[in-house]
Every structure is written in C-alpha cells, then in structure tokens.
Image (cartoon, grey):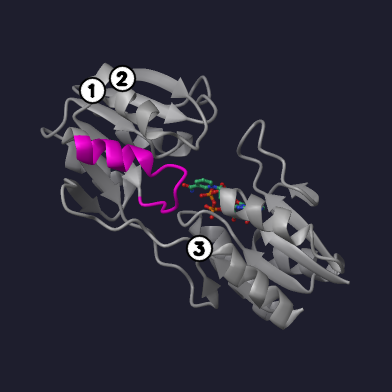
C-alpha cells in the first residue's frame, strides 16, 4: 500500500484524488487549509486545517506514514509549497508539485502585468472606474483605500463582517465559469478593468477571453516564485510519477 498526501484546495487536487482513488494499492489523503466554509469534498480521505509550519507537516508525514507528498495547491499559495519542500526533505520522502502553466497573453489582450496584489491596487489608481475584482476574499483589504472606484467583488464565501473591503458589490460564486456568464457580468456592470491572479487552468479563464472580446483591461498579478522541486503540469504526469516512485 502506498500512502499519498495531496496538499489540495484546487480543482486539480480534487481530480488527482479522484484518479488515485481508482488505483489499487494507493491510499490518498487530501489536505485542505480550511479557508472555504463548504469546500468541494474530494474522493478519498480528507483532513482539514494547518499543520503548524514545517515542523508540524514533517511530524504529520512521519506519524501518518506518508510515502509520497504531492503539492497540488494553488500557484499563489506559496507558503505551504515552501513548507512542503522542507518537510519532505526533512522526512526523506519524494515530493512533487502539480502546478498548471500560467496563462499567456495573446493578441487582443490588454494586460497590465504586476507582481503583487498591492501593485494591482496601485495600477488601478486614476486608470479604472468600474472593476471586476477576482483575487479572492483574503485580498480585498488591499483595495479598500480606493474610494473613487466601484468594485464588483467575486468570492466563494463572503468576507467577515468586520473585514476591510472596497466600495461596491459582492458576488458570491464558485467556478468553473462560462464565457456567457463572464461576458454578461462585464456588460451588465459596465466593467472597464478586471483584476485577476494568473492562476492558469480552464476553470476561470473565461473572464480573460471575455475581456479580450469586449476590449476590457486586465490587471494580471504574476505568480510568486515557486520552490526548487520536481514538478509536473498535468494529472497524467502526476500519476506517472506516483507509479515510478511508489
Ligand atoms: P499559504 O499562504 O501558502 O498557506 C498559509 C498556511 O495555510 C500554511 O502555512 C498552512 O498552515 C496552511 N495551508 C495552506 N494550504 C494548506 C493545505 N492544503 N492543507 C493544510 N494547510 C494548508 O496558502 P493560502 O494562499 O492561504 O491558500 C490556502 C489554501 O487555499 C491552499 O490550500 C490553496 O490551494 C487554496 N487556494 C488558494 C488560493 C490563493 O489565491 N492563494 C486560490 C485558490 C485556492 P501551517 O503552516 O499551519 O501548516
């Protein structure tokens, strides 16, 4: 029996868990941070909540006797990814990152690329009036000082009652989103600029296509650095790695 810990919180992690559940002799446990109130529950075993830094994760790997660690977290969840590399090294087990390729700018895209969410807020100043903000609930405070801009904020869960949020309207929804849905939002709310993380993948790409078609600007937040590690960009390659290393 091979026991695998998947660090999750993404559609890719859920798909990987579903594929691993079909392989005999493999037991996969998905770990979620516990940020989302009603997360999609992956197939296989599940644990929820932080480990307590590198030491806590290394301890978990040893106690639960994990053979392989797969980090399938979101490209912007960088703390857990660095922790995972350190913990796997400490315990001496194989580690893999499953990380989807970033979106690439194509002809017709009006992207303004920035390196942080704070820089995205700066880029909006005096440039945007009606913004579709899709960077997640945890990042809303970075835009709260922009009182002259109207924001449509899409998040999975609503922000806490005492959270700092910019002026505008909240839209609670969870992807994947269709091109029709995204175009309708841009037109209905008269959006001139989208703010997005460069998450990659298909589930949230429709807003980028809609922006291209409707000539809407996109402030695109580039990804943080990833740790030096073995990595693959798709689930088939992750499964091949499991079979090689298990
Ligand atoms: P982060 O900054 O990298 O992690 C902060 C802390 O949260 C980690 O040190 C760890 O706590 C805990 N943590 C994160 N992911 C975990 C997991 N899968 N299982 C157990 N503990 C986890 O992460 P984040 O940006 O807050 O994202 C949290 C989760 O949301 C991630 O799992 C990610 O896949 C998902 N997500 C993030 C984004 C995003 O834009 N950041 C978007 C979509 C989904 P300890 O140090 O106590 O172990």
* Residue 201 badge: none
The percent position of residue 200, horizontal first and vertical second, equals: 41, 54
Residues shaded magenta: 198-213
Instruction: Name the residue that disc number 2 marks.
Output: 167
The percent position of residue 140, horizontal first and vertical second, equals: 39, 33
Question: Which sits earlier in the primary sequence, circle 3 or circle 2?
Answer: 3
* CA separation in Å, label 1 and label 2: 6 Å
* CA separation in Å, label 3 and label 1: 36 Å
Disc 1 residue crowd, few under 14, some 14–19, many 20+, Cα 10 Å = few
**Do the residues under discs 1 and 2 have CB atoms within 8 angstroms?**
yes
The percent position of residue 204, horizontal first and vertical second, equals: 42, 42
Q: Is residue 215 visible?
A: yes
* CA separation in Å, label 3 and label 2: 34 Å
Horizontal side, residue 147 vs residue 80: left or right: left
Horizontal side, residue 47 vs residue 223: left or right: right
Instruction: Name the residue that disc number 1 marks.
Output: 147
Q: Nearer the viewer, residue 107 or 163?
A: 107
Horizontal side, residue 38 vs residue 106: left or right: right
For the N terminus, give its image quadrant: bottom right
Indicate the secondary structure of the residue bearing disc 2.
loop
């Amino acid at each position: 029996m091979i026991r695998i810990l998947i660090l999750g919180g993404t559609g890719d992690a859920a798909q990987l868990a579903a594929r691993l559940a079909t392989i005999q002799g493999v037991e996969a446990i998905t770990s979620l941070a516990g940020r989302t109130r009603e997360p999609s529950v992956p197939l296989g075993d599940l644990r929820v909540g932080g480990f307590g830094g590198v030491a806590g994760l290394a301890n978990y790997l040893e106690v639960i006797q994990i053979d392989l660690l797969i980090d399938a977290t979101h490209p912007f969840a960088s703390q857990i990814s660095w922790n995972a590399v350190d913990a796997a090294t400490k315990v001496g087990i194989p580690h893999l990152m499953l990380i989807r390729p970033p979106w690439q700018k194509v002809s017709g895209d009006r992207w303004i690329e920035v390196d942080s969410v704070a820089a995205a807020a700066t880029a909006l100043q005096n440039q945007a009036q009606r913004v579709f903000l899709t960077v997640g609930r945890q990042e809303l405070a970075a835009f709260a000082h922009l009182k002259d801009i109207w924001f449509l904020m899409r998040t999975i869960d609503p922000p806490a009652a005492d959270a700092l949020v910019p002026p505008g309207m909240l839209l609670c929804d969870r992807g994947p989103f269709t091109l029709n849905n995204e175009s309708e939002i841009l037109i209905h709310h008269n959006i001139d600029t989208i703010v997005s993380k460069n998450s990659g993948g298909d589930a949230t790409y429709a807003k980028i296509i809609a922006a291209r078609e409707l000539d809407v600007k996109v402030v695109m937040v580039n990804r943080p650095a990833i740790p030096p590690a073995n990595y693959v960009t798709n689930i088939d390659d992750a499964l091949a790695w499991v079979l090689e290393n298990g």
